[in-house]
Image (spheres, rainbow, N blue to C red):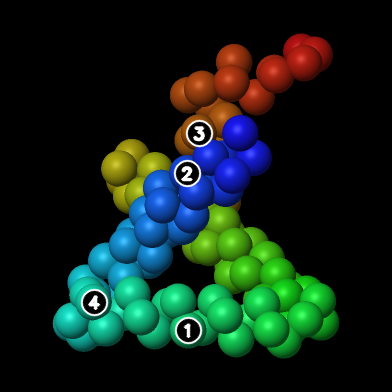
Amino acid sequence: MAVFWLLLYVVVNLTSILYLGALAINSISGINITVCMYLLGAFAILITLGGMKVIAYTDVIQVFFLVLGGLATIYLALQLVSTHYGEIGIMKGFGIMAEKASEHFHMIFE
């Protein structure tokens, strides 16, 4: 059973991860998708052989970009809310959102 799950992981999970990553790189750069899959596989092998220190560095970089993306999403969403109601600025957008949907800000206590 362990061999079955290992083969299933390799065949299904890893190939879908490589394909979806290569698809993203292909849509951004235009590089052939097969080449992208090989490059991603080689990069994954290099990262794995680099040890825990390299994995920790990549985790730090990923967290940085995830937080940056979250802040950019908040900024864009508040800007869109304020623009939709004829105002300018993210603070105005937050004020409008708090006024129009105040019930959503009471998640635990009022």
Pair 3/1: label in front: 1
Q: Work out whether residue 50 or residue 64 is closer to the camera in this orientation and state it.
A: 50
Residue type at numbered disc 3: Met
| Mark positioned earlier in the residue sequence (4 or 2) | 2
In the image, what residue occupies the spot 47% across and 84% down?
42
Pair 4/2: label in front: 2
Q: Work out whether residue 36 or residue 63 is closer to the camera in this orientation and state it.
A: 36
Pair 2/3: label in front: 2
* Whether label 1 touches label 4, CB < 8 Å: no
Residue 69: image x %, image y %? 53, 63
* Within-10-Å neighbours for mark 4: few <14, some 14–19, many 20+: some
* Whether label 2 touches label 1, CB < 8 Å: no
| Mark positioned earlier in the residue sequence (2 or 3) | 2
Please state if 66 lies on the left or on the right of 78 as rendered. right
| Mark positioned earlier in the residue sequence (1 or 4) | 4
Q: Which numbered tag is attached to residue 97?
A: 3
Give the residue pinned by disc 2: 8
Residue type at numbered disc 2: Leu
Give the residue pinned by disc 4: 34
Q: Secondary structure at mark 2?
A: helix
In the image, what residue occupies the spot 31% across and 79% down?
36
In the image, what residue occupies the spot 80% across and 13% down?
109
| Mark positioned earlier in the residue sequence (3 or 4) | 4
Residue type at numbered disc 4: Thr
* Within-10-Å neighbours for mark 3: few <14, some 14–19, many 20+: some
Vertical comparison of 51 with 83: above or below:
below
Q: Which numbered tag is attached to residue 42?
A: 1
| Mark positioned earlier in the residue sequence (3 or 1) | 1
Residue type at numbered disc 1: Ala
Please state if 80 lies on the left or on the right of 105 as rendered. left
How far apart marks 1 and 4 lie (CA) works out to 12 Å
How far apart marks 2 and 1 lie (CA) works out to 21 Å
